[in-house]
């Protein structure tokens, strides 16, 4: 089995140079990121290069946001979220 057969589907949320990036209205760079101690392989949406990104959680008074983040080769941050199983189309 190839590595690409094991890549899970994640929603690509976007890129950032590290100054500002909002997920569900929350600027992640203004919050404390809590590492969840796990990572997974994501694909760069432009060229499908695989990257190992870590899972993080941000907790605000009104919500909890879980996401994957890491840096691409161009030094920009990339952000992804897990696709809930019920939203997958077969």
Image (spheres, helix red, strand yellow):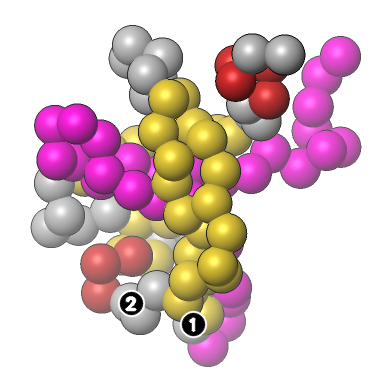
User: Which residue sits at x=34%, y=56%?
Assistant: 22
The C terminus, quarter of image: top right
Of residue 50 and residue 83, the one placed in the foreground of this image is 50
Q: Nearer the viewer, mark 2 or mark 1?
A: 2
The N terminus, quarter of image: top right
Tell me: 76 left or right of 59. left
Q: Residues within 10 Å of mark 1 (few under 14, many from 20)?
A: few
Q: Which residue is mark 1?
A: 60
Where is residue 62 drawn, in percent x and y?
57, 82
Residue lying furthest front in this view? 1
Where is residue 11 drawn, in percent x and y?
55, 34
Give the mark nearer the N terminus: 2 vs 1. Answer: 2
Tell me: 58 left or right of 36. left
Badge number at residue 31: 2
User: Which residue sits at x=41%, y=14%?
Assistant: 48
Where is residue 86 drawn, in percent x and y?
86, 37
Q: What element does badge 2 sit on?
A: loop
Q: What element does badge 1 sit on?
A: loop
Tell me which segment is drawn in magenta. Answer: 61-90
Could one spot residue 67 in this view of the protein?
A: no
User: Which residue sits at x=46%, y=76%?
Assistant: 34
């Amino acid at each position: 089995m190839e590595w690409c057969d094991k890549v899970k589907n994640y929603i690509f949320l976007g890129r950032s140079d590290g100054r500002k990036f909002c997920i569900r209205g929350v600027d992640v760079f203004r919050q404390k990121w809590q590492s969840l101690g796990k990572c997974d392989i994501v694909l760069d949406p432009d060229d499908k290069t695989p990257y190992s990104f870590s899972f993080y959680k941000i907790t605000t008074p009104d919500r909890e946001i879980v996401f994957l983040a890491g840096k691409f080769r161009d030094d920009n941050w990339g952000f992804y979220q897990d696709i809930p199983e019920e939203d997958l189309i077969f």
